[in-house]
Amino acid sequence: MTPTDAPQLPSAPFAIAAAITMLFSTALAWAKDAYQPLTRVMNTIAGHNWIAHGVADLVLFFGIGLVLSKSQWPYRIAPNRVIAGLVAATVVSGVGLFGWYLAF
């Protein structure tokens, strides 16, 4: 089976975008808790820092997903690798947030 004959995952660009967005969201949650001026800026922007956080996540997700959907390389990644990356990002983000809130 050649790479062009390999099964494709039509949602691969947005699965990759979801993985990146999860990691970004975790890092942003850490940053907001560790650096209060960032929380205040986000409160000013959207009225509450979690609203600004959600908007940033949505913009990042759709932006990356749309950019990647114009490219061909996400479609060449084996579906199992895309799914494994999404699962890994979910686990890393979940453990990262759990550990962060457990420690602080």
Image (cartoon, rainbow, N blue to C red):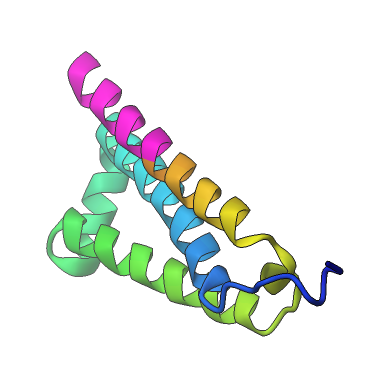
For residue 82, say whether it is visible: yes
Indicate the position of residue 26 as horizontal and vertical percent values.
36, 42
| Magenta region includes residue 101 | yes
User: In which quarter of the view is residue 104 placed?
Assistant: top left
Instruction: Indicate whether 53 appears above or below 2.
Output: above
Most foreground residue, 12 or 93: 12
Q: In the rendered image, is residue 104 in sight?
A: no
- Total count of labels: 0
For image coordinates 44% across by 68% down, the residue present is: 61
Q: What secondary structure prevails in the magenta region? A: helix
| Snapshot quadrant of residue 56 | bottom left
Name the quadrant containing residue 91. Answer: top left
Q: Is residue 25 left or right of residue 101?
A: right
From the viewer's perspective, is 57 left or right of 4?
A: left
Q: List the single residue furthest toward the front.
A: 1
Q: Residue at x 56, y 69 (%)?
A: 12
Q: Name the residue at the left extreme.
A: 47
68, above or below 89, in the image: below
Which residue: 35% across, 70% down?
A: 58
Image coordinates for residue 22, horizontal then vertical, percent: 39, 51
Which of the two residues, 49 or 70, is positioned nearer the viewer here? Answer: 70
Quadrant in which the N terminus is drawn = bottom right
Answer with left or right where residue 51 lies relative to residue 11: left
Between 103 and 8, the one nearer to me in the picture: 8
The verdict on residue 30 being magenta is: no
Give the camera-side residue of 79 and 37.
79
Q: x%, y% of residue 21?
A: 43, 57
Which span is picked out in magenta?
A: 91-104
